[in-house]
Image (cartoon, coloured by chain):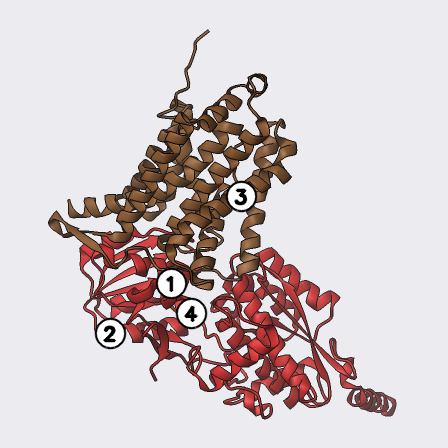
Chain colours: A red, B brown
């Protein structure tokens, strides 16, 4: 018995004395963070934004001396398809042995990698995906950043639509997964509130002509048109609407459309379009966002059209939140302790890490059974050719 | 009736762009027997050049209507000369595979260079518009796209049918060796055909830029309808391509309007199936059938 106690005490002492770098992805001088997302193909802007936002935050963190003396290094994998997303997560965890993985893809990639991440147990941060499939079933090692769940987002959509006081609305949604998910979640809320849905029109991914759908909508004379899908489609539909007699009907659009490109492409037809946004400020509103855009341009050069995108913003802010959790974990960087530290963050924002970090995301709060960092959205409207936040 | 007219106007507008893309496709095929699946990428390049001239260089929009077709024409000649020349006498499958992947490569290069999913230029004459009876509205942009596409199409048909260069193209297409023996220069005629086809694609790109937006996916969004329009019209008929494009635009729009949006794309494939089954040489082809 005495020997047993001695052995246990020795083992405990060894464990406590073990350096933090015994944990996968941690060395004496470095913490290796993995990330994946689409960097080629039609969603390259999303994945590149996720990657570049993280790079910008990591550069700043390293300039300030890193996290508790350790520099952060990012290993990013391009992954467009579901198969590539699973392969990227597997490679980062099993081959590259990263400390944590940042999921910087949309819902498709996140859904594909979700089960693997749950089983692997590696701490993961979902920055961009709204899907519930990476949130449910709940996993102790998976955290979510700025992007709320699709359910939260749709409840916010409904509140915003209700605020427009319509009696009749027409719905126009893409036939593919993302807008259909938005449609399925929002439509029952609208119906339950007693607002008449005059028509539900669909279009296909990448459609360029919306004549048929807009003519069908015009026939039903709705008070508001609700659009779900991506801005590439929404901008063209908006642009074509006045010609079909819908020039004066107000539009509410899903969050995927809140980009600088939408009012620019749709022109005057976009004036008054309403939606929700998941950051305190929109691009070009000055303040911290202006400073972020200046730092982005300094680091990556003159931005291409549409960048920095919302994915740059969320990834920058969320990377700071991850850094805060690591910082708070102290010298014990075991995964259980990181998770404990992460769950203890309340109203966390980038500037909590140290001066110079920009609070361009809404504050994050976590709990033992609540890994959704942000649940808040901000109303936004197109005014004078750009979206502006209205809170 | 109002709804029918609105759908018809929208269908004709999109059909006019399909027509123009299909004419270039047909011209290249008719003269060189090459089914150029990279043609959609030529249309997209035309649209991007329009954006570059108008938005980056801030030049007058009219300049794009001249420079973009010329630039795309030159690009098409360069591609044929450098990449496709070794395949001139290759089997059809090799050429198809080559042009399909060439189109994809060009699409991804555009995505890489411009790093943006959607660009735009202001519509031409969009501040003008007319109300037809029953409050049916036709915007200046719609009228312009329709008129410009039809005029360009007729102009192309005249060049192909009436001018010496058109005769040379037809001669080469009819008999490669025979045309050479008659003194036609294969190199010059191939270059002319690719320039002409490329320029028409470039012009389609300029017209498509405002209403369809400028995105790498314009490549796919135009090549499929251009192919279908060419099948409807008959692969060797420039006039047929014009009518084929307009018909396709109308059929797609009516299918989406009166059936469902899913029927829009399905209608294209049903048309291709029906035409290839019952009239494989198209509705307007001059090809003669002989029963032996």
* Residue at horizontal 40 percent and vertical 79 percent from the top: A377
Please give the count of numbered marks on the rendered protein: 4
The mark lying in front, picked from 1 and 4, is 1
Name the mark nearer the viewer: 2 or 4.
4
**Disc ID at residue A259:** 4
Residue at which label 2 appears: A164
For mark 2, name the chain.
A
| Residue B74 marker | 3
Horizontal relation, residue A241 to residue A140: left or right: left
In this view, the mark in front (2 or 1): 1
- Of residue A137 and residue B54, the one placed in the foreground of this image is B54
Q: CA distance from mark 2 to mark 4?
A: 21 Å
**Distance between the Cα atoms at labels 1 and 4?**
10 Å
Q: Are marks 4 and 3 in contact (CB under 8 Å)?
A: no
| Of the image marks 1 and 4, the number of the one nearer the N terminus | 4
Crowding near the residue tagged with mark 2, few <14, some 14–19, many ≥20 C-alpha atoms within 10 Å: some
Q: Is residue A337 visible to us here?
A: no
Horizontal and vertical percent for residue B209? 40, 53
> In terms of depth relative to the viewer, which is nearer, A300 or A250?
A300
Tell me the tag on residue A265: 1
Measured in 3D between alpha carbons, the distance from the residue under mark 4 to the one under mark 3, in whole angstroms, is: 36 Å
Which quadrant is the N terminus of chain A positioned in? bottom right
Q: Are marks 3 and 2 in contact (CB under 8 Å)?
A: no
Foreground mark, 3 or 2, reads 3
């Amino acid at each position: 018995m005495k020997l047993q106690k001695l052995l246990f005490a020795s083992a405990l002492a060894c464990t406590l004395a073990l350096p933090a770098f015994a944990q996968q992805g941690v060395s004496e001088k470095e913490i290796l963070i993995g990330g994946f997302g689409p960097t080629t193909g039609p969603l390259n802007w999303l994945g590149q934004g996720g990657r570049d936002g993280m790079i910008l935050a990591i550069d700043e963190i390293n300039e300030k001396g890193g996290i508790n003396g350790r520099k952060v290094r990012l290993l990013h994998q391009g992954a467009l398809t579901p198969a590539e997303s699973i392969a990227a997560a597997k490679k980062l965890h099993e081959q590259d042995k990263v400390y944590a993985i940042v999921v910087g893809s949309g819902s498709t990639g996140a859904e594909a990698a979700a089960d693997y991440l749950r089983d692997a147990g590696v701490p993961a941060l979902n920055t961009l995906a709204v899907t519930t499939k990476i949130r449910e079933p709940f996993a102790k090692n998976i955290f979510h950043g700025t992007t709320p769940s699709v359910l939260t987002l749709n409840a916010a959509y409904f509140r915003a639509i209700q605020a427009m006081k319509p009696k009749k609305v027409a719905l126009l949604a893409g036939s593919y997964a993302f807008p259909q998910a938005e449609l399925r979640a929002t439509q029952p809320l609208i119906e339950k509130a007693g607002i008449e849905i005059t028509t539900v029109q669909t279009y296909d991914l990448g459609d360029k002509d919306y004549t048929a759908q807009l003519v069908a909508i015009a026939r039903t004379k709705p008070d508001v048109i609700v659009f779900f899908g991506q801005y590439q489609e929404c901008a063209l539909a908006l642009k074509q609407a006045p010609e079909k007699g819908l020039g004066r009907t107000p539009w509410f659009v899903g969050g995927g459309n809140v980009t600088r490109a939408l009012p620019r492409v749709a022109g005057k037809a976009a004036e008054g379009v309403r939606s929700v946004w998941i950051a305190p400020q929109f691009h070009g509103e000055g303040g911290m966002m202006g400073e972020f855009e200046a730092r982005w341009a300094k680091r990556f050069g003159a931005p291409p059209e549409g960048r920095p995108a919302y994915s740059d913003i969320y990834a920058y802010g969320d990377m700071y939140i991850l850094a805060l959790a690591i910082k708070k974990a102290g010298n014990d960087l075991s995964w259980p302790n990181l998770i404990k530290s992460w769950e203890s963050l309340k109203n966390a924002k980038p500037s909590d890490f140290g001066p110079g970090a920009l609070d361009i995301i809404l504050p994050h709060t976590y709990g033992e059974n609540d890994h959704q960092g942000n649940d808040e959205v901000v109303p936004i409207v197109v005014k004078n050719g750009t979206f502006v936040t209205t809170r | 009736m109002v709804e029918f007219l609105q759908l018809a106007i929208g269908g004709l507008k999109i059909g006019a762009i399909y027509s123009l893309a299909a004419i270039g496709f047909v011209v290249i095929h008719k003269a060189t027997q090459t089914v150029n699946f990279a043609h959609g990428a030529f249309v997209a390049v035309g649209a991007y050049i329009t954006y570059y001239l108008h938005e980056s260089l801030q030049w007058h929009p009219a300049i794009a209507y001249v420079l973009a077709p010329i630039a795309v024409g030159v690009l098409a000649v360069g591609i044929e000369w450098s990449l496709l020349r070794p395949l001139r006498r290759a089997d059809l499958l090799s050429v198809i595979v080559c042009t399909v992947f060439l189109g994809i490569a060009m699409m991804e290069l555009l995505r890489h260079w411009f790093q943006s999913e959607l660009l735009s230029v202001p519509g031409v004459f969009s501040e003008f518009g007319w109300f037809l009876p029953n409050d049916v509205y036709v915007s200046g942009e719609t009228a312009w796209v329709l008129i410009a596409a039809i005029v360009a199409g007729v102009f192309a048909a005249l060049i192909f049918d009436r001018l010496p260069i058109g005769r040379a193209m037809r001669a080469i297409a009819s008999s490669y060796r025979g045309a050479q023996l008659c003194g036609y220069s294969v190199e010059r005629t191939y270059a002319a055909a690719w320039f002409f086809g490329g320029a028409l694609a470039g012009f389609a790109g300029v017209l498509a830029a405002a209403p369809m937006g400028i995105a790498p996916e314009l490549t796919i969004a135009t090549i499929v309808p251009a192919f279908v329009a060419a099948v409807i019209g008959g692969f060797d008929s420039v006039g047929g391509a014009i009518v084929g494009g307009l018909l396709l635009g109308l059929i797609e729009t009516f299918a989406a309007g009166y059936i469902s949006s899913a029927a829009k794309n399905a209608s294209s494939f049903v048309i291709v199936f029906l035409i290839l089954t019952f009239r494989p040489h198209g509705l307007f082809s001059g090809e003669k059938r002989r029963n032996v």
